[in-house]
Image: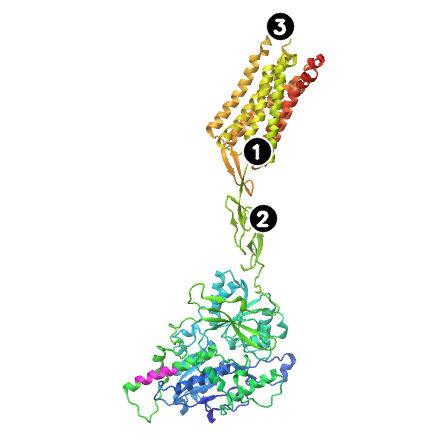
């Protein structure tokens, strides 16, 4: 049976306001349990401005609103008591277990008033006074919130009354030095913050807000959540702390609601209990509907409980972590049988029934004419009543059984030590329960293990539920995942993306980021003075990639790889060199062969006309030497084409420089002979000895010998070798010859320049010779071309990279050789081949 109301306790206070807000329900029994449940909440007024002064400012006469969904906690208490009374194996020598039920107010004054009334008597508020009925009371079940547990515990501890707290677990209440008579039934929430962070990581939410209560429990959750978020680079955009006693709509709205709803943060975590956070439901103006948010909550805050009938859309799509509980056998069947017609003596049930079904008729646009006494609780929508046992109701059920089992053990111990006469009713003292409650553990009817020892209290497992408010004002909680902290990695957190329904205008997972994600080819650059989640995106530098989203550091490609165009992965570099098969290499090789053949033909012409005055006048030996050197110069450029090897690297530089040294030495000797020929033409001059052929040969050998010496020293100390250049071209590995000694390279090259400069100066000095002997002018012009080519070679060579350097060097060899060939020998060939009988021309040449 439902509780029978004692006339003395139906309405305990006769003031003008308090009877409306403090109904007291009782059921007599041999032993009585006190219970404090939050059935009413102070109704928040929307009155503002001048309207505030139109009513009497009596704080004791505030309007209180029935919280319909909390009535399930009353029914869970009644169900547990009746189940215990029907069990023949539990408390066999006690005829009945009873209870007193009080409303627990979220107010220090009201809570202490109710506690004092419980201790001193139903109609009395006198400390240290107890009416005769109160000597059967042994324990108190209460504390839907930590604040209520502390407020009640201060007074109950004076009398050593055990207080069984059924609200969310709070580590502060585990301090036995401060709360020695308080026991917590709820499972630990020590892993709740891990589950929420796993959810944020899953949906890649990195910029979230937090609303929590301004107490130690909220501070502990904030500390744990923030620490776990930092490990996963998730940031708190803001934290709003709500005073646990806040109940004024205007103050709360001015404080935090505009900041929450107008901010760009899309995901908001709500941590707290229904009582502390009820102001969120009162402070939801209709204008905020369009500013849709994703709410992440816990089941301790019943998101379906709200003051208005049709404001569920404000939290449509919210995700809630609800502690897993098993179904208590017979509880739903019990709920189906409950109605005021069956239990007419329960005014509290009748008030709930009329209020709930009146609201239901209001939703159906019907005029309520009477309470639907024969209706069923199953007809009520979710925000009025839930047929599934809530977490708080489940804990109340376990708390009643824990007290009953403690009483049973005391009864067994007492019956062994002394006999109790049948006519006596045995009632233990409240303080006697402590030794048994501390060690209490049992399996409830659902098969769950229940502990009252905080050290043995296991961590909770969670179902992830989504709150859906459908257009026809139907609401439901759908399971979309679960979080089981003690399971193996990979199985502890599961969620079904397809089962989640986001906002009505949000077909996919909403973004919750302070800054747009940095894609591949970019990395995050922190903004000075802002959280790590707020950043700019900077592109990758040369040679580095960013192959993931939101990378903080670039990844450098290996030396044999290079970034692709998108710079999100590395590609292998191609090996390259100046190949004879490619167009450029083929062209240069053809040019070199062409001019070498042309030079050979000119040599053939000079050999054919070796007895002509023009060939004799230009020193046949030097001309032959120079032409042969030019042929070899053209051919040595072929050593620079093709894949470099150890042999080609050794010979290409030394051969080129030795041959050029011979060529330039020959020009120098020719120039000196031209100058001497003019100076020693005076008859009888002893200087004619310098016009002999041996002198010119000595000049060529001496100048070439110096170059040979320099090359030997270079090759002996640090010879060139094949090498790879991986830096000149970003996407290529260039096979080249490394000269090793830069000094040796420029030393032998500089010596050739020195010989060319000497030839140019000598030829320049001979510029004033008579026109009839103008060989010096051709040499001067040839040296001018030669020096111009190699002077321009130096900066060009230094500014190029890779195989372009080889091309520049080949071009310089060919250009300077062509310059010598054209300026010195082409005019003579013109005379020899086209005007051989022109005496005037022959004399001028």
Secondary structure type for disc 3: loop
Furthest toward the front, the residue is: 581
Q: CA distance from mark 2 to mark 1?
A: 29 Å
Identify residue for label 3.
684
Quadrant in the rendering for residue 490: bottom left
When the figure is inspected, residue 554 is found, relative to residue 308, above or below; the finding is above
Q: Nearer the viewer, residue 394 or 141?
A: 394
| Mark 1 burial class by Cα count in 10 Å: few <14, some 14-19, many 20+ | some
Residue that mark 1 sits on: 580
Within-10-Å neighbours for mark 3: few <14, some 14–19, many 20+: few
Residue lying farthest to the left in this orientation: 417
Q: Is residue 12 magenta?
A: no
Q: Position of residue 789 (x, y in %)?
A: 62, 28
Q: Can you say which quadrant of the picture contains the C terminus?
A: top right
Highlighted range, magenta? 403-413
- Quadrant housing the N terminus: bottom left
């Amino acid at each position: 049976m439902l509780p029978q109301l004692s006339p003395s306790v139906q309405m305990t206070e006769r003031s003008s306001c308090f009877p409306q807000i403090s109904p007291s329900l009782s059921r007599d029994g041999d032993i009585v349990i006190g219970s404090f449940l939050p059935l009413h909440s102070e109704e928040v007024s929307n009155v503002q401005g001048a309207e505030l002064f139109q009513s009497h400012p009596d704080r004791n006469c505030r309007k209180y609103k029935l919280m319909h969904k909390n009535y399930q906690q009353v029914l869970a208490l009644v169900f547990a008591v009746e189940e215990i009374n029907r069990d023949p194996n539990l408390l066999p020598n006690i005829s009945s277990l009873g209870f007193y039920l009080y409303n627990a107010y979220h107010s220090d004054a009201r809570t202490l008033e109710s506690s004092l009334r419980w201790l001193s008597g139903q109609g009395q508020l006198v400390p240290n006074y107890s009416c005769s009925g109160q000597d059967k009371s042994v324990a108190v079940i209460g504390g839907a919130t930590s604040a209520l547990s502390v407020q009640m515990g201060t007074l109950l501890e004076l009398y050593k009354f055990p207080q069984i707290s059924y609200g969310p677990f709070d580590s502060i209440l585990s301090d036995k030095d401060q709360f020695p008579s308080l026991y917590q039934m709820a499972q630990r929430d020590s892993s709740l913050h891990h589950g929420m962070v796993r959810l944020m990581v899953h949906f890649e939410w990195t910029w979230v807000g937090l609303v929590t209560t301004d107490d130690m429990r909220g501070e502990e959750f904030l500390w744990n959540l923030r620490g776990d978020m930092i490990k996963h680079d998730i940031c708190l955009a803001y934290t709003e702390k709500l005073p646990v006693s806040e109940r004024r709509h205007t103050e709360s709205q001015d404080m935090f609601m505009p900041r929450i709803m107008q901010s760009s943060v899309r995901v908001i975590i709500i941590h707290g209990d229904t009582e502390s956070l009820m102001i969120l439901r009162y402070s939801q103006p209709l204008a905020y509907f369009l500013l849709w948010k994703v709410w992440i909550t816990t089941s301790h805050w019943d998101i379906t409980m709200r003051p208005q009938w049709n404001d569920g859309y404000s939290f449509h799509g919210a995700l809630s972590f609800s502690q897993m509980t098993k179904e208590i056998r017979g509880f739903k069947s019990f709920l189906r049988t409950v109605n005021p017609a069956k239990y007419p003596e329960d005014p509290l049930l009748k008030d709930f029934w009329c209020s709930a079904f009146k609201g239901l008729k209001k939703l159906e646009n019907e005029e309520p004419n009477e309470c639907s006494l024969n209706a069923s609780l199953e007809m009520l929508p979710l925000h009025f009543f839930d047929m599934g046992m809530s977490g708080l109701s489940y804990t109340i059920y376990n708390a009643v059984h824990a007290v009953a089992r403690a009483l049973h053990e005391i009864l067994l111990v007492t019956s062994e030590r002394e006999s109790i006469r049948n006519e006596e009713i045995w009632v233990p003292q409240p303080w006697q329960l402590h030794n048994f409650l501390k060690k209490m553990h049992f399996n409830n009817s659902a098969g769950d293990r229940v502990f009252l020892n905080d050290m043995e209290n296991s961590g909770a497992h969670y179902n992830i539920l989504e709150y859906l408010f459908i257009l026809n004002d139907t609401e439901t909680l759908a399971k979309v995942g679960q979080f089981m902290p003690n399971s193996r990695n990979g199985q502890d957190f599961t969620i079904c993306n397809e089962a989640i329904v986001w906002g009505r205008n949000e077909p996919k997972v909403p973004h919750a980021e302070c800054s747009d994600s940095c894609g591949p080819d970019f990395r995050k650059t922190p903004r000075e003075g802002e959280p790590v989640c707020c950043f700019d995106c900077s592109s990758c530098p040369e040679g580095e990639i960013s192959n993931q989203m939101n990378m903080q550091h670039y990844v450098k490609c290996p030396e044999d790889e290079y970034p692709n165009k998108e710079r999100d992965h590395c590609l292998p570099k191609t090996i390259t060199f100046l190949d004879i098969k490619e167009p450029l290499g083929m062209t240069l090789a053809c040019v070199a062969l062409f001019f070498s053949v042309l030079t050979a033909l000119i040599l053939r012409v000079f050999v054919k006309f070796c007895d002509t005055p023009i060939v004799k006048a230009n020193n046949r030996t030097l001309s032959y030497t120079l032409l042969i050197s030019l042929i070899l110069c053209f051919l040595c450029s072929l050593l620079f084409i093709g894949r470099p090897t150890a042999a080609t690297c050794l010979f290409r530089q030394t051969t080129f420089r030795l041959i050029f040294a011979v060529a330039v030495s020959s020009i120098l000797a020719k120039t000196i002979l031209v100058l001497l020929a003019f100076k020693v033409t005076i008859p009888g001059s002893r200087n004619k000895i310098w016009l002999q052929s041996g002198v010119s040969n000595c000049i060529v050998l001496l100048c070439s010998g110096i170059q040979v010496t320099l090359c030997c020293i270079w090759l002996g100390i640090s010879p060139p070798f094949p090498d790879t250049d991986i830096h000149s071209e970003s996407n290529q590995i260039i096979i080249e010859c490394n000269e090793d000694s830069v000094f040796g390279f420029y030393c032998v090259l500089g010596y050739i320049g020195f010989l060319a400069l000497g030839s140019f100066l000598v030829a320049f000095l001979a510029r004033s010779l008579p026109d009839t002997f103008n060989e010096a002018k051709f040499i001067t012009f040839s040296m001018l071309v030669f020096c111009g080519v190699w002077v321009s070679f130096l900066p060009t060579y230094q500014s190029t990279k890779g195989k372009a350097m080889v091309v520049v060097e080949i071009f310089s060899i060919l250009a300077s050789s062509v310059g010598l060939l054209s300026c010195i020998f082409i005019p003579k060939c013109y005379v020899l081949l086209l005007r051989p009988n022109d005496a005037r021309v022959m004399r001028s040449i």
